[in-house]
Structure formats: structure tokens, C-alpha cells
Image: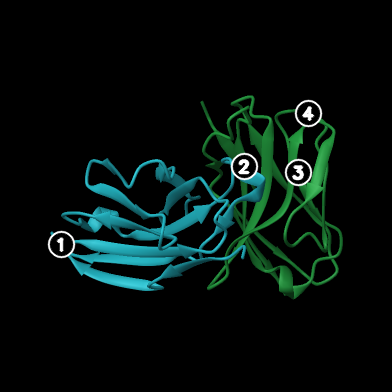
Amino acid sequence: NAGVTQTPKFQVLKTGQSMTLQCAQDMNHEYMSWYRQDPGMGLRLIHYSVGAGITDQGEVPNGYNVSRSTTEDFPLRLLSAAPSQTSVYFCASSWTGEHGNSPLHFGNGTRLTVT
Amino acid sequence: QQQVKQSPQSLIVQKGGISIINCAYENTAFDYFPWYQQFPGKGPALLIAIRPDVSEKKEGRFTISFNKSAKQFSLHIMDSQPGDSATYFCAASKGGNNRKLIWGLGTSLAVNP
């Protein structure tokens, strides 16, 4: 199994450009999420989804859009990139269950630089 | 009340020593406390997790100690190895709900050979 696959691994954007970070999982997980990781800030939840067609905002959603048309894919869109969005982005997925979720499975991240 | 405070921010340990990372929480409704390990260039991965019905959980060289009255939990790495060098995150949630997971800020561990 590939697990959680993120593409691209690295990306450089100019301010104002748009792009989509891709995330795919092959574990049939209902729950998918996007985090950003910045030095000294830990992991901050951007958006999440509990199933196809259902998305919701996390802690830091401004400047980002998501959609979930299939169970497998959960792309993150930056509509107009800003230098403050320079970060490492992680996609994570898990089962959801009656007694709580399974552990999060993370991808290996996308390192985004906005100049 | 939603914070998880993790310390230290960084830690240097000699090979064979004990690494100790501490976390404190405020919300007494939290009932799931995982630790994630992150190697450079990789995403975090679950290392070990504990629920408050036990005071300690051990998996190999890794042990979580849990003090419900003090609202603290800690990760102990016995016989630390250079391969343990990584960033460690503690977290907490109610009901194991991943969308409500509150993360510590991480501890960068370096184990010197």
C-alpha cells in the first residue's frame, strides 16, 4: 500500500499565483485533513473532511479551499498565494469509528515557498 | 483550556541515556493522549498512545507515563539511540476525535553517538 501520497514534494510560487496541493490515500479512510507545519508553531489544522462531499474548517482556514469529491482524494487549493503561506503542508487520513478515530496517517509533505 | 504545553523545545541526550519529554493539558475532558514521531523530511507517525484508565504504557524502549491528577503525561525513551533523533509531538483529544486533536509544539531530540 502506498498510504498517503502528496504531490508535489517542493513548490515555489510567486505572490498572487494559485496552485493545488494534491493528496491521495489508498486506505479507504473516511477522515482526511490538511495541516501546515511552521517552526515553533507545531501542527495547525487547515481543513478537514469526514467523507466525500463533506468538508469543514480547521484552526487556520483563511486563504485555502478544499473539496472532497471522492474518498481517495483531498486537494488543497491556494487561490492567491501570500508569503505567509510559506510552510510545509501535510495531508493526513484516518478511520473514523464509534469509539474514536484510528491514528492519523501522514503523507511526507509538500514544502511550499511563496516569494 | 484547549492548550497542550510541551517541554522542552529541544533536547540533547547521549547514546544510552534516557530522554524525557513532558506535556501538560488543561481540559479534563481529554481522554486520548498520543505521541507522534517525525523524522526529517517525513510526516509524523504514531509512536504510542495512552488513555487515562492506565498510568503507564510501555512499548519497547518507549514509555508513556500519565498523571491524571496533575494533568500531565510524559514520554520516556530508555537507552536512547541516534536513530531516535527526531521531533516528537504530544497531543490530546476527547474521544480520540482526530478533528479535535490538540497538538503540543514539538520537541526536537538529538541523540549523540
In this rendering, do the residues under marks 4 and 2 share a single chain?
Answer: no
Question: Pointer 3: what residue?
Answer: A75
- CA distance separating discs 1 and 3: 42 Å
Packing grade of label 3 (10 A; few <14, some 14-19, many >=20) is: some
Q: Amino acid at mark 4?
A: Thr
- CA distance separating discs 1 and 2: 36 Å
* x and y percentages locating residue B59 in the rendered image: 27, 40
In the image, is A23 to the left or to the right of A43?
A: right
The picture's colour for chain A is green
In this rendering, do the residues under marks 1 and 3 share a single chain?
Answer: no
Q: Quadrant of residue A30?
A: top right
Packing grade of label 2 (10 A; few <14, some 14-19, many >=20) is: some
**Residue drawn where x is 45% and y is 65% of the image:** B24
Q: Are marks 4 and 2 in contact (CB under 8 Å)?
A: no
Asked whether A103 or B3 is in front, the reply is B3
**Is residue B11 placed above or below A106 in the rendered structure?**
below
Chain ID for label 4?
A
- CA distance separating discs 2 and 3: 22 Å
Question: Pointer 1: what residue?
Answer: B15
The picture's colour for chain B is cyan
- CA distance separating discs 4 and 2: 22 Å
* x and y percentages locating residue B52 in the rendered image: 43, 45
User: Element type at marker 4?
Assistant: loop
In this rendering, do the residues under marks 3 and 4 share a single chain?
Answer: yes
Packing grade of label 1 (10 A; few <14, some 14-19, many >=20) is: some
Chain ID for label 2?
B
Q: Amino acid at mark 1?
A: Lys
Dot 1 or dot 2, earlier in sequence: 1
Q: Amino acid at mark 3?
A: Pro
Question: Pointer 2: what residue?
Answer: B97
- CA distance separating discs 3 and 4: 10 Å
Question: Which image quarter is the C terminus of chain B in?
Answer: bottom left
